[in-house]
Amino acid sequence: MTFERDFAHHPMHYFTLLCIMLVGLWGIFWFNYSRAVQLGIILSMASSYVVWGIVHHAHHKDLHIKIVYEYLLVALFSVLIFASLVFRA
């Protein structure tokens, strides 16, 4: 299934993901004085992304362990990249 077709069938799924990411991004900028809070927001965004992916694929009835690993790896790499940006000297 292509992204365009999936997006047309489930726009609320992607709207939810967009809202989660935008609220997280807002939180990162709002709490720019506290690196610990920013890290917590980044971890929350990553875990929300993984949960969203699992729910999305469970709804499609195509959830497999490979897909869960893929979402976990993308979330892990994202946390590493953004945390390195937050904690840069």
Image (tube, rainbow, N blue to C red):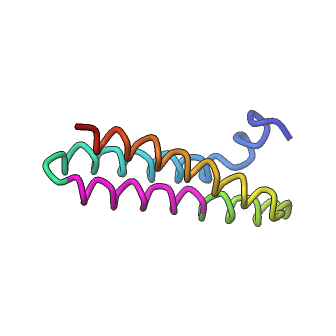
Taking the magenta stretch, the answer to whether it contains residue 36 is: yes
With respect to residue 83, does 44 lie above or below?
below
Is 39 positioned to the left or the right of 53 in the image? left
Q: Nearer the viewer, residue 21 or 72?
A: 72
Is 70 positioned to the left or the right of 24 in the image? right
Task: Report which quarter residue 71 is drawn in.
Answer: bottom right
Q: Which quadrant does the N terminus fall into?
A: top right
Q: What's the magenta region?
A: 35-50
Residue at the left extreme, as displayed? 33
x 25%, y 59%: residue:
37
Taking the magenta stretch, the answer to whether it contains residue 37 is: yes
Q: Position of residue 68 (x, y in %)?
A: 72, 61
Number of numbered discs: 0
Q: Position of residue 32 (x, y in %)?
A: 18, 45
x 22%, y 37%: residue:
89
Residue at the front extreme, as displayed? 89
Q: Position of residue 55 (x, y in %)?
A: 67, 65
x 69%, y 63%: residue:
54
Majority secondary structure in the magenta region: helix
Is 42 positioned to the left or the right of 59 in the image? left
x 60%, y 52%: residue:
12
Is 49 positioned to the left or the right of 63 in the image? left
Q: Position of residue 44 (x, y in %)?
A: 42, 61
With respect to residue 74, does 59 lie above or below?
below
Task: Report which quarter residue 36 is drawn in.
Answer: bottom left
